[in-house]
Structures are given as structure tokens and as C-alpha cells.
Image (cartoon, coloured by chain):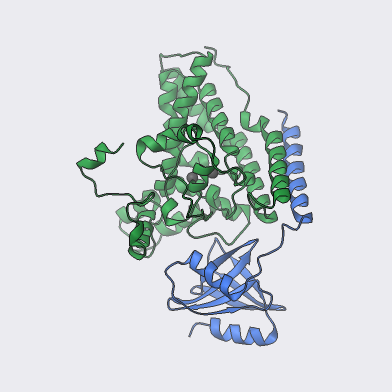
Chain colours: A green, B blue
């Protein structure tokens, strides 16, 4: 395959479609008086985050690209650019997305980049564009390595990743309820992804899927949207600022302040960077597991219901379907 | 896509959406009643035991006394944000008070208070 293979950047090409879809969703909500909420500064912050994310890709994209091209030179495999190669790449890249996204919620270093996507208390199509500016610094491009080593050209891998993000755009809406059962069973949908944006203890750390929700069902992280529990969008500790710079960098600053405070062991410093968000050496903060446990202490009747099904590790876990 | 074109599209798109939202009244800040403020505080801090809630006359902020200490709730766009009053500075402001939290994610809040309210709030916010 030639080294100059190039695909268009799908996210850039989709910009006019994004703008049109946002206007249509807004008009629909305004006319029907249901199906979501829009707020000026919230929407502008989301859109500026989206623009900044594209800019970051243009400025720093060469780092991930260079890394993947080194691997491409190493691998003897080449699966070509047929439609089947693209389909296979898209599906495997979605599995890659699932794990990167899961790391994004379970490792503070990666959460520092991803947190901004969850920082709005709203959930509409602009929220989809509230994307990170600091993805390169998470080094999560290493999770793309197996794809390239398997013989998918880096351009194909990045193209598949772009399509994945575009798919996720339309699911950031309250205007669509639940879709037909077969679709909800296989695909990530507005309903599943609303749950992912919830700060309710029940909805923390679930539904990491990009395109196919089957990964969450396979790996035990699926929680369906509950009729009787409305999703409360945003962060456990909501931000009190619309300033995009603060939104983009606040958690990185938090990591820096935590690991540089005096009197910690090396292990504690590392935990502040790489343990799940909410870790603290003195118990002054809460992880999602602790938030769920505290919720169950107050609402024991919720134990065993979706989002609260964690059992102690044992042989039964392997049998879970 | 040429970069200039992308830039024009992005700036134009964001501006158009912002203007449409603003002109259709989507910039209004949340107005709180005492019972809203209570519910909002519990939404942010579900374990706090609320003792008393005082809403500012403009409805954009509430002083929340809890067994866990005093807290401030304020309108944040159409929603609210709350912080415990632990690490902050209080400044005079022509319309009331300005709270500077030592918190990168919630740097400051301007409270619009009547002179009476201001005296009362200042006394209750100042750590004893
Ligand atoms: Zn997420
Ligand atoms: Zn999302």
C-alpha cells in the first residue's frame, strides 16, 4: 500500500451537517415544547469546545499519526482498503473505542481529558460537540496499535474513528425516546447514551459504547434507561464556569495540585494520577464505587437493580450472561 | 476542506446558534424559590441535612445552612451550581457581594443583594 494513502477527515466534513442538525433539533424542541433544553452559554461553550477539539486535531494530530505510521512500517500485514477491510476496521475500532472510553472513566489521567464531555448539565446535540482538547496527552493512541499491527492502514483506522464520532453525534438528544427493540439491542442509542451522561449513582460508569452497545452487554457495563429514574445530566461535582479554558484544563490542574502536595508517598502520588476519579489519600473524596455504596446505604431497596448489581467477585461472575 | 472555509463555517455557525438562542429567550438564568433551592442543594449534595434556606430577592442565589456547614447555591444558566462555603474570600460589590472561591471550577459568583440582605448574608457567610 502506498504511504500517501489519505482519507478525508470526516469530522471536518460533517461540520455543516452538525450546524444544520442543531438548528433543527432546537426548532423541534421550541415547537413541541418538549424533548430537551437549550441554554445560550452552555451551548456556546459546547460548540467552542468542539471547535477547539478540531483545532487540537489539526495542530497535534501528527503525534498520533507519526506513532501509528512507525507501527505501519513495522508490520508485515496489509489488509488493504476494500469495503470489507473498512467494515472490519470500523467494528474493531469500535471495540477500541469502548475500552478507551472505559479507561476514560476509570483512570483519572484519561478522565482529565474526557471529563469536559460530561461537564454540561444539558443534553442536546451541542453536548455531542463538547469534545476534549487534550486527548493527545492521554496517550490513548496506543490502543490503536493492535489495529495497525493487524494490517489496517493508519489512515483507515483514523477514518473509522472519525465515522465513530459522527455516529455518536445524533444520540446526544432527548428528542428521541426509545427506538425499536432490535435496534436498542445492538446499537448505541439516545436512550443508552443519556444514561451514560447521568450523574445519578445508578448511572455512573456504564454504557461506554461508541456505536455498538453489544460491547457493554458483553463486558457487563450495560445499564438500561429506567422509566422511573430520570437522568440527571452532568458531573457529580458540577462546574461553576462556562469558560472553555477552565472546562478544558480543570482536571489536569487538579491532578497537578494533588500529586505535588507535600507529605505523600510515591504510591499516593501515582494514585492521584492513575487511580479512578475520586481517589483521595485521606478519604476526603468519593469514587463512583463509594458513591454507589453510599446510595445503597440510604436506599437499600435499590440493591440488585440495574446499576447496583455488583456482587463480590466469585465463580458466579463468570456465569453472568 | 480548505482551512479558511472551515474557520468561517465554525465561527459563523457558533455565532448564528448563539444569536438564535439568545433572541428566543434561552439566556434566562434560573430563578429559585426556597423549595427549588432545597431540591437543587440535595441534587448537588444528597447527604447534606439542610437546616435553613435563604433565597436572595432576585432569586439567583440561595444561602443554605446545613449540618455540614453553610453553602452557597446560585443560578448557572438555566441550572444551578452549589459549593460549601469553606475556602473563599468575600468582597464588596456595588450590587451586593462577590464571592471568590479558591476553586478553579467555580472561580467567582456575584450576589445581587439589597443593603439589608447584604448585611445579613455577610454575617452568616463569614466563618465563625
Ligand atoms: Zn464518557
Ligand atoms: Zn456523550
Give x and y (percent) for residue B9: 75, 37
Vertical placement of residue A154 versus B72, above or below? above
Name the side, left or right, on which A293 lies relative to A19. Answer: left
Q: Is residue B29 visible?
A: yes
Name the side, left or right, on which B50 lies relative to A37. Answer: left
Rendering quarter of residue A121: bottom right
Name the side, left or right, on which A249 lies relative to A320. Answer: right
Give x and y (percent) for residue A139: 45, 38
Vertical placement of residue B74 versus A111, above or below? below
Mark count: 0
Q: Is residue A69 visible?
A: no
- Looking at the image, which is closer to me, A180 or A13? A180
- Looking at the image, which is closer to me, B64 or A189? A189
- Residue at coordinates 59% horizontally, 49% vertically from top-left? A123
Vertical placement of residue A59 versus B16, above or below? above
Quadrant of the frame with the C terminus of chain A: top left
- Looking at the image, which is closer to me, A154 or A317? A317
- Residue at coordinates 63% horizontally, 78% vertically from top-left? B91
Give x and y (percent) for residue A32: 70, 49
Give x and y (percent) for residue A27: 73, 46
- Residue at coordinates 35% horizontally, 54% vertically from top-left? A289
Rendering quarter of residue A74: top left
Residue located farthest toward the left when viewing the structure as drawn = A315
Amino acid at each position: 500500500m502506498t504511504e500517501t494513502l489519505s482519507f478525508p477527515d470526516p469530522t471536518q466534513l460533517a461540520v455543516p451537517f452538525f450546524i444544520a442538525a442543531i438548528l433543527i433539533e432546537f426548532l423541534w424542541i421550541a415547537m413541541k415544547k418538549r424533548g430537551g433544553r437549550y441554554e445560550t452559554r452552555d451551548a456556546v461553550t459546547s460548540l467552542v469546545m468542539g471547535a477547539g477539539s478540531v483545532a487540537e486535531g489539526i495542530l497535534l494530530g501528527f503525534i498520533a499519526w507519526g506513532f501509528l505510521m512507525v507501527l505501519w512500517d513495522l508490520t508485515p500485514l496489509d489488509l488493504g482498503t476494500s469495503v470489507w477491510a473498512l467494515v472490519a476496521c470500523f467494528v474493531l475500532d469500535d471495540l477500541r473505542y469502548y475500552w478507551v472510553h472505559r479507561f476514560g472513566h476509570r483512570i483519572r489521567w484519561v478522565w482529565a481529558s474526557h471529563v469536559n464531555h460530561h461537564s454540561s448539565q444539558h443534553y442536546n446535540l451541542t453536548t455531542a460537540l463538547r469534545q476534549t482538547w487534550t486527548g493527545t496527552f492521554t496517550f490513548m493512541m496506543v490502543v490503536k496499535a493492535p489495529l495497525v499491527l493487524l494490517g489496517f492502514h493508519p489512515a483507515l483506522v483514523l477514518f473509522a474513528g472519525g465515522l465513530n464520532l459522527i455516529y455518536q453525534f445524533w444520540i446526544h438528544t432527548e428528542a428521541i425516546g426509545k427506538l425499536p427493540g432490535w435496534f436498542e439491542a445492538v446499537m448505541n442509542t439516545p436512550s443508552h447514551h443519556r444514561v451514560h451522561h447521568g450523574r445519578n449513582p445508578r448511572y455512573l460508569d456504564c454504557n461506554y459504547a461508541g456505536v455498538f452497545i453489544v460491547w457493554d452487554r458483553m463486558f457487563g457495563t450495560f445499564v438500561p434507561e429506567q422509566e422511573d429514574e430520570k437522568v440527571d445530566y452532568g458531573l457529580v461535582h458540577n462546574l461553576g464556569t462556562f469558560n472553555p479554558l477552565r472546562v478544558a484544563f480543570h482536571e489536569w490542574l487538579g491532578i497537578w495540585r494533588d500529586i505535588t502536595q507535600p507529605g505523600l508517598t510515591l504510591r499516593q502520588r501515582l494514585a492521584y494520577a492513575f487511580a479512578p476519579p475520586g481517589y483521595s489519600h485521606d478519604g476526603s473524596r468519593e469514587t463512583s464505587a463509594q458513591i454507589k455504596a453510599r446510595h445503597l446505604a440510604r436506599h437499600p431497596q435499590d440493591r440488585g437493580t440495574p446499576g447496583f448489581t455488583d456482587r463480590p467477585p466469585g465463580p458466579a461472575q463468570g456465569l453472568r450472561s | 476542506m480548505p482551512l479558511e472555509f472551515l474557520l468561517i463555517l465554525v465561527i459563523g455557525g457558533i455565532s448564528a446558534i448563539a444569536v438564535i438562542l439568545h433572541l428566543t429567550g434561552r439566556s434566562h438564568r434560573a430563578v429559585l424559590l426556597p423549595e427549588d433551592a432545597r431540591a437543587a442543594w440535595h441534587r448537588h449534595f444528597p447527604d447534606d441535612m439542610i437546616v435553613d434556606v435563604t433565597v436572595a430577592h432576585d432569586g439567583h442565589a440561595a444561602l443554605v445552612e446545613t449540618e455540614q456547614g453553610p453553602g452557597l447555591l446560585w443560578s448557572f444558566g438555566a441550572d444551578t451550581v452549589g459549593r460549601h462555603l469553606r475556602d473563599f474570600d468575600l468582597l464588596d460589590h456595588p450590587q451586593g457581594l462577590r464571592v471568590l472561591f479558591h476553586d478553579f471550577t467555580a472561580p467567582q459568583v456575584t450576589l445581587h443583594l439589597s443593603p439589608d440582605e447584604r448585611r445579613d448574608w455577610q454575617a452568616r457567610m463569614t466563618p465563625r
